[in-house]
Image: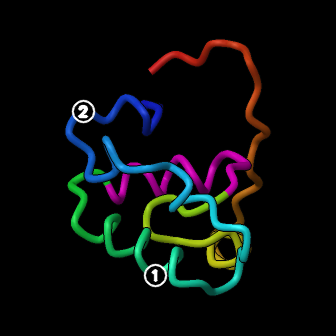
Amino acid sequence: MLKPWNFEGASCWGIDTEMFFPEDRNYSPENVQAKKVCQSCIYIKECLTYALHYQVLGIWGGTSMMERQALRKKLNIIPRPITNERHTA
């Protein structure tokens, strides 16, 4: 699975990453702003797929952590922890 930070030309490239990792994990202006960036991205589906299958924090694929938790439950997905080992694409 290709890692989202390898998505050349993603809408989030060059944007301050703090926007995608707000302190308020439920609702905040940063969440709304980050999700708007995601909505215009050509990689939104790939990014969301990655975020559903791995335990990532913040806004990914236009979803919050709580939204992904609900999707995982609905889709019966158990996320894997992120490790330092190399994953192949």
75 lies above or below 45 = below
Residue displayed at 55% across by 63% down: 59
Q: Nearer the viewer, residue 5 or 47?
A: 5
- How is the model colour-coded? rainbow
User: Which residue position is annotated with label 1?
Assistant: 32
> Closer to the N terminus: mark 2 or mark 1?
2
Toward which corner of the image does residue 82 lie, by quadrant?
A: top right
23 lies above or below 88 = below
Left or right of residue 68: residue 6: left
| Stretch of the chain drawn in magenta | 44-57
Is 50 one of the magenta-colored residues? yes
Instruction: From the top left corner, tell me how far across and down residue 41 is, in percent.
Output: 25, 58
Residue displayed at 76% across by 25% down: 83
**Other residues around mark 2 within 10 Å, as few (<14) / some (14–19) / many (≥20):** few
User: Which residue position is annotated with label 2?
Assistant: 8
Quadrant holding the C terminus = top left
Instruction: From the top left corner, tell me how far across and down residue 20 is, in percent.
Output: 53, 59
Determine whether the residue tagged by mark 2 lies in a helix, strand or loop.
loop
Left or right of residue 20: residue 8: left
